[in-house]
Image (cartoon, helix red, strand yellow):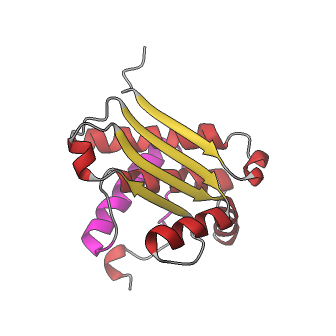
């Protein structure tokens, strides 16, 4: 019997293009659980009973979210919307929401010569880590987040997505 903490993941398929990826929901679910477990182990986080919603959308859908919530009128690959800390301290089990856009994901996977499934898993892990408080706005935080991403992805058999990039501390 697994000792895996109970995490509820609701995957909503909002764009018809995702129908061509029959294993998308299971890939995302597996990635979110692995990210939660990795962060919980590293930082002794209590994720028992946590809830996360993931929306599989398209560029139009994520562009609207990006415009309305972040003031950036453009599509992006993944967005995370963490539940406010005050709600979490008040006992809300919902950690937040993630949105992933299929067209941007496909373009990036193709241009970076990565398997689509591996890139999807990476974006789901990345988005989940944002819900758990990780960020990449400053080099030190980015290094910590990338290290956790690498560890989680390795546990899932996904190659290091940062293997051929410069270290964060040297990035502009």
Taking the image as shown, residue 28 lies to the left or right of residue 93, namely right
Q: Position of residue 155 (x, y in %)?
A: 45, 42
Task: Say whether residue 5 is magenta.
Answer: no
Instruction: Tell me if I can see residue 149 in this picture.
Output: yes
Within the image, what quadrant is residue 77 found in? Answer: bottom right
Position of the C terminus by quadrant: bottom left
Q: Position of residue 13 (x, y in %)?
A: 66, 46
Question: Above or below — where is 171 with respect to 44?
Answer: below
Question: Above or below — where is 69 with respect to 14?
Answer: below
Taking the image as shown, residue 21 lies to the left or right of residue 67, namely right
Q: Residue at x 62, y 51 (%)?
A: 56
Q: Position of residue 75 (x, y in %)?
A: 60, 72
Q: Position of residue 6 (x, y in %)?
A: 39, 26
Q: Nearer the viewer, residue 143 or 160?
A: 143
Q: Nearer the viewer, residue 79 or 65?
A: 65
Q: Residue at x 41, y 44 (%)?
A: 35
Taking the image as shown, residue 161 lies to the left or right of residue 136, namely right
- Magenta part mainly helix, strand or loop? helix
Segment tinted magenta in the rendering: 137-163
Q: Residue at x 38, y 81 (%)?
A: 171
Position of the N terminus by quadrant: top left
Taking the image as shown, residue 72 lies to the left or right of residue 170, namely right
Q: Residue at x 61, y 43 (%)?
A: 12
Instruction: Tell me if I can see residue 113 in this picture.
Output: no
List the single residue furthest toward the bottom. Answer: 172
């Amino acid at each position: 019997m697994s000792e895996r903490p109970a995490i509820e993941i609701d995957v909503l398929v909002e764009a018809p293009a995702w129908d061509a990826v029959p294993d998308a929901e299971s890939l995302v679910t597996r990635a979110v659980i692995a990210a939660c477990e990795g962060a919980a182990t590293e930082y002794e986080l209590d994720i028992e009973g946590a809830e996360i919603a993931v929306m599989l959308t398209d560029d139009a859908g994520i562009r609207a979210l990006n415009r309305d919530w972040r003031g950036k009128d453009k599509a992006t690959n993944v967005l995370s919307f963490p539940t406010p800390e005050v709600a979490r301290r008040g006992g809300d089990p919902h950690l937040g929401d993630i949105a992933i856009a299929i067209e941007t994901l496909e373009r990036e996977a193709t241009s970076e010569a990565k398997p689509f499934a591996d890139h999807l898993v990476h974006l789901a892990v990345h988005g989940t880590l944002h819900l758990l408080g990780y960020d990449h706005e400053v080099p030190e935080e980015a290094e910590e987040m990338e290290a956790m991403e690498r560890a989680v992805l390795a546990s899932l058999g996904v190659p290091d997505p940062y293997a051929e990039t410069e270290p964060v501390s040297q990035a502009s």
